[in-house]
Image (tube, rainbow, N blue to C red):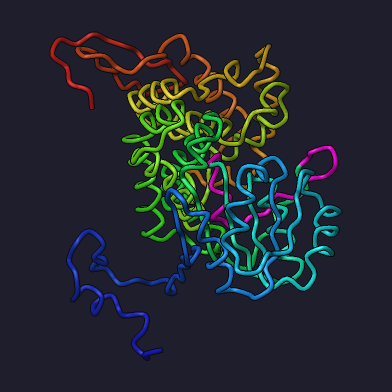
Amino acid sequence: MPKAWPPSPRSARQGSQGVDALPATPIRSAPVIRIFAATPFYLQGVGALAHVGAVAARHGRKPGLIIDARVRPLVGDAIRASFAVPPREVAFAGEVTDGNIALLSQEMAGCEVIIGVGGGKALDAAKGVALRIGSPFLSVPTIASNDGPASRGIAIYDDTHQLVRVDQLPSNPVAVIVDSAIIARAPPHFLRAGIGDAIAKTFEAQACARTATRTKQGTTATHAALAIADAAYRLLRTHAEAALASVNRGEHSEALEATIEACILLSALGFENGGLSIAHSVTRGLLRLDGAKERLHGEHVAYGVLVQLVVERRPNATLVEMAAFLTRIGLPISLADLGVRAVTPELIETTAAVILSSPHVRATDRHLTQGDIAAAIRFVETLPARAPRAPESGVTYVISHGAGWTPPRVCPTPGARSG
């Protein structure tokens, strides 16, 4: 490594004078190390399953295949045909527990690469096996309900489906292979949840960057992570509705390709290198609520985005417009939408207390109390009656700031343009 690394403020400024140019004042603190980590190989498209065997062969001569028992009849033949030599194969249909991972690891003993195929549980079980036996992991998701397929995380549960901990692979999957034709035929609510999970990442990465919160890499957010999280958001706002329409028809489309990439690849890169904040903290509270706890992770996060926007005192126009977008694609904007039957002040307070226990809640500009979070939830609960639709022509949403949590006011303004 050259002795001049890292460069002095002066030498760094001699390059680009763009938006990232260093300030003229001397940097007094020690240099900050930043880390960006990602899967080294991502393959997406119609017919991608035909490449699984060849890609796996790059990482080991003895492959082990752990496949979701429910999708095995749909994709098993195509995946097996991609291998020159049939892999050792196990169907998985249980919970991702330490006991099940131990049993699977015995069956996969000696395998030099582990391939996980299916939804989140099958992939997490395969990740757990790869971690336990020390083999690389190759991810083949058959739904796009979250960004787990491209991440290091492994959600470990007990036999009652209570989350015990989240383990981490030593590195991201060596490859992620996504057959978009399979995603197109999956039930639409999975993709809808993936959109809810991914759309939060730009707001959460921004919060972590503002507060210098440590990411999963143990460092502060990189500029690349912020750009990627924002790219995911922009892709989803442009293509998500058309993508869901094509999935409802069981058809492939370019909008679907863009949405899959945002939900699986860009979302994972954004959160692992950018960090998480309030939106994901909210999921901890929702998992305690009857009705809501049965819903998908991405549906929880979608509601959490709204809570985060309120906590951050974002303009009401931003909040109302986001609620309208989530409504259009069928994501929840209220606790009732999540299946909670009786929303009482007591329920909101106890939920806020659980949310406050999340480590990600600290990625905010100010110290939050249980009352702050409860007030934000109450504010969000006013949205279904006030902002169920997107802004129409001739209508502008007035930004309301000041003390307390005042609901957004909607004022007709002739000739107004939407922002």
**Left or right: 142, with 103 as reference point:** left
Q: In terms of depth relative to the viewer, which is nearer, 260 or 319?
A: 260
Q: Is residue 157 magenta?
A: yes
Q: In terms of depth relative to the viewer, which is nearer, 105 or 415?
A: 105
The x, y position of residue 265, in whole percent, is 46, 52
The x, y position of residue 278, in whole percent, is 54, 39
Q: Quick check: can you spot residue 149? A: yes
Q: Quadrant of residue 335?
A: top right
Residue in view at x 54 percent, y 55 percent: 150
Q: Is residue 328 magenta?
A: no
Q: Quick check: can you spot residue 365? A: no
Which residue of the protein is positioned furthest toward the left in this rendering?
Answer: 415
Q: Quadrant of residue 345?
A: top right
Quadrant location, the N terminus: bottom left
Q: In terms of depth relative to the viewer, which is nearer, 175 or 17?
A: 175
**Left or right: 261, with 51 as reference point:** left
Residue in view at x 17 percent, y 21 percent: 417
- Start and end of the magenta stretch? 144-162
The x, y position of residue 400, in whole percent, is 34, 20
